[in-house]
Amino acid sequence: MAGRIRREDVDAVRERSRIEEVVGEHVTLRPAGVGSMKGLCPFHDERTPSFHVRPQVGFFHCFGCGEGGDVFTFLQKIDHLTFTEAVERLATKTGIQLRYEDGDGPRRDQDPNRRQRLLDAHRVAEEFYSEQLNAPHAAPGRRFLAERGFDQAAAEQFGVGFAPQGWDALTRHLRGRGFTDAELVTSGLLSAGSGRGPYDRFRGRLVWPIRDITGATVGFGARKLLEEDQGPKYLNTPETPIYRKSQVLYGVDLAKRDIARRKQVVVVEGYTDVMACHLSGVPTAVATCGTAFGTDHIKIVRRLLVDDDAYSGEVVFTFDGDEAGQKAALRAFEQDQRFVAQTFVAVEPHGLDPCDLRQTKGPDAVQALVASRQPLFEFAIRTTLARFDLDTAEGRVAGLRAAAPVVAAIRDPALRPEDSRQLAGWLGMDVEDVRSAVARAGRAQPARNPQPARNPQSPRDHAVVHGPGGTQPSGAPAAQQAPAPIPRPNPRDPVARTERQVLEVVLQVPHLVPTEEICRVDSATFTAPAYRAVYDAIVGAGGPPTGPDPGWAERVRANAPSPIAGLVTELAVAPIPANDVARYARDIVLGLRELQIGRAQANLHSRLQRANPDEQAALLSQLMSLEQQRRALREE
Ligand SMILES: [Zn+2]
């Protein structure tokens, strides 16, 4: 978690970033009506454009799949960034210096410039290493790659380089580029020497740049090549302000798009395995760097796989079948239960890793290995049962006793009955016996909170309004809140349509809306609950501004409860079906006022029927005043 960026800075970055330019890097936009642009949605497959951007409002919205939000939301979704990362990226682009709130978080005492300096040092080091790979002294490195079937193009694709022998080749190069020894030691590129001063951390090794999800190099992994090297086979960057091994996944920058698209991530064990997978048509492969796959890695992967608050997609662990690998896979049970149903294991029966496999049997074999995945549950049970002789009654009973806790550990109650049935099948035992054994094992374990069932939903399939999720600068992730769905208004209802059109103009062109009339509208004027909630957010944001105000729609969205925020972007981006927008805005608002007055008049008429003569006079005068208001609406 990063420190929180100051609100004013976030607003300044949003204002200075042009959403049509940021979106335009990914989507070709064409003008579509007044103040609007459209293109093919990058978030769902479509042939006719339903993805709209409204630069003045600062929002995008897809009328096909329902994705929408501001420029930060767009970057978060398209590049799988956190809110903070999206703001930081645009701040760099627009030249705004961010300030962070005091509070918990690693950035509290960190100069934002320092991070940039460390990233710069890594960029320079990466160039240096990759040039060195072509030098004569790098022959052992080139040989290592060639022996594993990686040519020069592959080395370049993954930025593989060579760290020269000796002690100070990189040190001198980086000093020459203006970096201080203190910065370079902090970056982890140099080791702090005692007597002689700092020296190159990686020497005589092949190096792989380790990049964060945005593609910035934050560290290196280095493979031993030479006999005389006394160090470990693999050496990685130590923990630094920009490199935390529990939070980096090698290859994630290259794989993220395919992971999101294919809804699958393949976890392999080494740098060469990631390369082999990508070159074999498995572009979703990533690896941890010198550590086991842990909770932080799950978070990163989940961010890539999460769709509309629902967990979807597969996580496939490939292991060469050894016990360490099995343990790593089984650990997923303890990590995050929501993960279990999606976790698969692919074991190569001959103990070959993807790199060996590609070389000995070709790229198809690597794809076949991934395709042969089995559910983690099945793998865990089979691994447990393999220790017992299931041909004997005693063996089966012992096997059940060992396997029941594994099934009981599955916290998702929806999965458990199916799993008991499967276990009974493997053991050749009665399902009820297995179920009661699992239930006993479950009671023996500490109580755990059952996970609520999650329904994958998409706005297209369900007539509810969804929250946008993950766009707030702080607070709980959207996945933890379960906002109540609000029924989507019926598009054929003419009253609801008028209400919708009013909200569209108030959000998009507030300065063109007749102020006096909109002030007479109140929350109760809106019959559709979703539109009433949007109107409440408009009032909460201070009511429509009288002049052009670029931050207006965003303030409304910030004021809206999360199930409504998506509707705010939709309304703020919806095309206005008129060339004379000022006239249209006026007509639409007057139309709603007429409805409102008509309803009040009908109400008074019915009260008049029941009223005594004293009350009648007052009601009649109210009726007349309403009638005057109604007539005044259409007098220019
Ligand atoms: Zn879409």
Image (cartoon, helix red, strand yellow):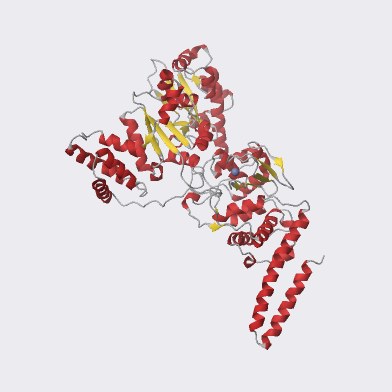
Is residue 306 visible in the rendered image? The answer is yes
| Residue occupying image coordinates x 44% and y 32% | 266
The picture places residue 255, in percent across and down from the top left corner, at 51, 32
Horizontally, residue 614 falls left or right of residue 487, namely: right
The picture places residue 482, in percent across and down from the top left corner, at 48, 54
Residue 613, quarter of the rendered image: bottom right
**The one of 459 and 298 positioned closer to us in this rendering:** 459
Position of 438 relative to 293 (above/below): below
The picture places residue 501, in percent across and down from the top left corner, at 68, 57
Horizontally, residue 181 falls left or right of residue 553, namely: left
Residue 88, quarter of the rendered image: top right
**The one of 338 and 271 positioned closer to us in this rendering:** 338
Residue 389, quarter of the rendered image: top left
Q: Ligand 1, what quadrant?
A: top right
- Quadrant into which the C terminus falls: bottom right
Position of 635 relative to 378 (above/below): below
Residue positioned most to the top: 136
**The one of 596 and 549 positioned closer to us in this rendering:** 596
**The one of 126 and 86 positioned closer to us in this rendering:** 86
Is residue 272 visible in the rendered image? The answer is no
Residue positioned most to the right: 636
